Amino acid sequence: MTVGTVRTFAAAKAPVAVAAATMAAVLAAYGSTLLLEHAAHLHIDSVIQAVVLSVTLSRAHRGAPIPDRLIGFVVMPAVAVASVGLGDLMRNDAFAGDAAFAALVASGIWIRRFGPRFTKAGTLMMLPAIALLVIPHGGPGASSTHLMWAPVIALIACFWVTAVQVAVERPWRAARTKAPATATAPAPAPAAGKGVRVSTRMAAQTGIGLCAAFAVGHRLFPDHWSWVVLTAFIVCNGARGRGDALHKGLLRALGAAGGTVLAALASGLFAPRDPDTVVLIFVVLGLAAWLRQRSYAYWAGGVTAALSLLYVYYGQSAGPLLQTRLEAILVGGVIGVAAAWAILPFRTRDVLRRRAAECLAALTDVLRDEPHARARFESSVTELDTVYGPLRLHRLVSRARPHHADVVDALREMVPHVRAAGPDARALRANVGSVRRAIARRHDGTPYKRLALDDATAAHAIDAGLARIHAIYAPPPTDPPAAEPSPTTEPSAATELSRTAVSKRGPESPEKARPAG
């Protein structure tokens, strides 16, 4: 079996392993909370909350070191207690409850400015609150999870997610390997625009978007306003620029439409409170977790189908709700995209620029033979996946070449060559510096100059990728204007031959090509 075959097989197994670990934690949390519900005579919303927390926490904790996982055992119970009071407030005083919900979520995004530990805490503190949007809401005075049991349910979800992922991922080894590299990692750019931090922009977009979603949802869909709010949150939260928000909105709408139709077709097979409905919900969630690695649309469709089946379990027919659900999801998507485009907007290409600079900074350290630099470079390249989707879609629609999505392609293609690079790759440091200056819009220093390397070497492949990136970010060359040919002078045969050759070859250097947009 060849090395390429082994890598392909391992890559194919990765989504299955992730989905299996997620569903193992979810089922364990579901079983534990179900026993707790029967013993303590709790409401069914406690079981739903445990499932939602396990699903969302499995993704938030994936690949995290042990210290980051311990944050969840502190933050989640505290926020779970607050979420119980928040849920009661939203039932009894919609205006005050909705405002408090938006403030909680926005503050969880805003504190990301203080570093990775606060980013993790902010992500975790939003999970119990978001679970409120999934739990079916009753009128004023409706029963909910008792205050004393809310932190217990949160701890159950944290325990099972941590136990399963520690057994599968072995994060203590990752922590020993990556800790030295984290200390030398470049600090993230404080802002994506002029003077306003990215965390502030995202918090403002999400907070205002949620307020608008609450107002429109209660006005147009009084019985199902949570669908509008949940969709607006999904589109706004973590949107890395205007393009990413639009991309997420489109995938959310497409996935939700497909998931709702599938759930409507399957709902006629089950009666209210049918245990088989619960089994199907977990099957759908498992498939969604597996297919999420391919596209977010599958996850959106799977979650929407699971929620539709949940409402069927509670006795609400999916048929009459089909049109209402689709309308609510579309309205929420429009609100989320509008918030990202109108409130302190920033471009996805600017996020790509910053992350590409981080990748090249790590590549510089690799060429200096610094310890753990190669792992940091590969981790930085992996982070580009979060912005690749909207850029790839824009490239497909615009059909423009070169395109900023080519930057991600070039860096991905460098990874195996960086692993195999030898001492001759150190000569690329000057060219890496030239590309970094081009990304930073600095045009001083040594210009980019392709190295005369053997085509078969890893250094040559890295140099080719750097040239592609430089062609996108470097300014167009300022050539002196060519002399006008005399109208009475016929071009010579040699001149015509030269023009024909140049037209067939295209631009003489990649710096003359400019990206779309």
Image (cartoon, helix red, strand yellow):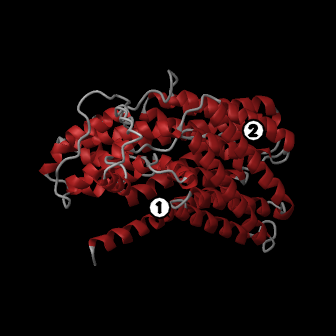
Residue at image position (21%, 38%) is 430
Classify mark 1: residues with Cα within 10 Å, few (<14), some (14-19) or many (20+). many
Three-letter amino acid code of the residue under disc 1: Val
Residue 54 location, x and y as percent?
A: 56, 53
Q: Is residue 182 visible?
A: no
Q: Nearer the viewer, residue 255 or 279?
A: 255
Three-letter amino acid code of the residue under disc 2: Ala
Residue 459 relative to residue 220: left or right: left
Residue at image position (50%, 36%) is 121
Residue at image position (61%, 49%) is 248
> In this rendering, which labeled residue sits more in front, label 1 or label 2?
2
User: How far apart in space, not on screen, are marks 1 and 2 (Cα)?
Assistant: 32 Å
Q: Nearer the viewer, residue 450 or 354?
A: 450
Give the mark, 1 or 2, whose residue is nearer the N terminus: 1
Residue 501 location, x and y as percent?
A: 32, 56
Residue 303 location, x and y as percent?
A: 65, 58
| 308 versus 275 height, above or below | above
Pointer 2: what residue?
213
Q: Nearer the viewer, residue 273 or 178?
A: 178
Residue 227 location, x and y as percent?
A: 75, 48
Q: Is residue 439 visible?
A: yes
Pointer 1: what residue?
18
Residue 172 relative to residue 208: left or right: left
Q: Is there a contact, CB below 8 Å, between mark 1 and mark 2? A: no
- Residue at the extreme bottom: 1
Residue 281 relative to residue 400: left or right: right
- Residue at the extreme front: 488
Numbered disc 1: secondary structure: helix
